[in-house]
Amino acid sequence: ANICHAYQILKSGGLKDENIIVFMRDDLAYHPANPTKGVVINNPSSQNYYPGVPKVDYIGNQATAHNFYSVLLGNAKALTGGSGKVLKSSANDYIFLFHSDHGDNDDNDNIGIKTIPIPIPEPTANLIGDAGAKPLGMPIGPTITSTDLLRVLGQMHAARSYYRMVIYLDACKSGSMFYQGLPNNIGIYAMTSANESASSKSTEDRAGRGKTLEEHYNVVEARVRSRSQVMRYGDLSFKNDLIGNYIVFLPSGGDIDKWNQDGKLDDQDVGEEECLR
């Protein structure tokens, strides 16, 4: 649901599908437990975010870590299924990466899935990685590890694939991806919904495009401070960039959503809570 919502925000702000790449399992809209078939929401008062979301990028069994890394590296030949769309960015481009899934995943989804390993060269930047980091879930197959993700980011930096890059990770223990390895001088700013060891809490900030990355962080951090630790890593030198440079929001912005504003639900519980409502 969060992925569908993010897509609608970008589209409403004017981005074209050719500039958006979607990974999702796509098993929610018509799931037997969904009482409103074809409707995907991420809070009880939200609109239906499902219509129009591309079903041709990397959906279901195609939404793997292998394809995710291949897309970031612009390596279309390494893809296994999907639309074939990869990043074709340059040193002049802004990139925004949003990941929403579970952290501290145990790879239970790996059963019956055959993956083809993608060779990831060692980065030229000093990216360390944390062998003990809690992995990030993907819709299917193996999880995303800190070591592999940082190697991919290092290769992107070496290839001059971006000017500035912003990464938002929405997952429990998501800080473990970066807290021991993301340098502060390669033009990547990362915000995670939790530190390396705690659960994350659900909240929403309907920011206007005029809000900065710093202002957005401050709002989210304040709203869940007592129950979750929102973190930032990497290059904070451009924290005063307008968020509109990376995420195109609705021009009218809007008031901060009141639902769950105290951060009472773990992200791991939100999916069931929202479906039941």
Image (cartoon, rainbow, N blue to C red):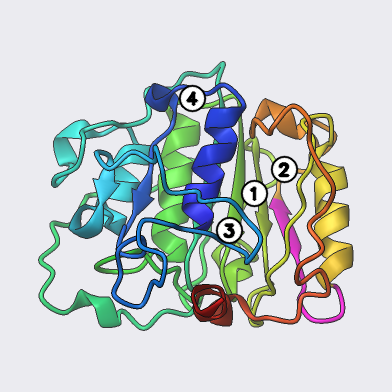
Q: Residue 42: x and y, percent?
A: 57, 62
The residue labelled by disc 3 is 169
Q: Above or below — where is 85 with respect to 136?
A: above
Residue drawn at x 81%, y 47% as measured from the top left? 216
Q: Which callout, 1 or 4, points at the residue further toward the start of the chain?
A: 4
Residue drawn at x 69%, y 26% as measured from the top left? 245
Q: Nearer the viewer, mark 2 or mark 3?
A: 3
Q: Secondary structure at mark 2?
A: loop
Q: Is residue 121 visible?
A: no
Q: Which residues are magenta?
A: 225-233
Q: Secondary structure at mark 3?
A: strand
Q: Residue 125: x and y, percent?
A: 53, 43
Q: Which callout, 4 or 3, points at the residue further toward the start of the chain?
A: 4
Mark 2–mark 1 contact, CB under 8 Å?
Answer: yes
Residue 229 forms part of the magenta stretch? yes
Q: Is residue 272 visible?
A: yes
Mark 3–mark 1 contact, CB under 8 Å?
Answer: no
Q: Secondary structure at mark 4?
A: loop
Q: Nearer the viewer, mark 4 or mark 3?
A: 3
Q: Residue 1: x and y, percent?
A: 49, 59
Picture disc at residue 235: 2
Residue 73 forms part of the magenta stretch? no
The residue labelled by disc 4 is 160
**In the image, what residue type sits under mark 3?**
Leu
Q: Which callout, 3 or 1, points at the residue further toward the start of the chain?
A: 3
**In the image, what residue type sits under mark 4?**
Arg
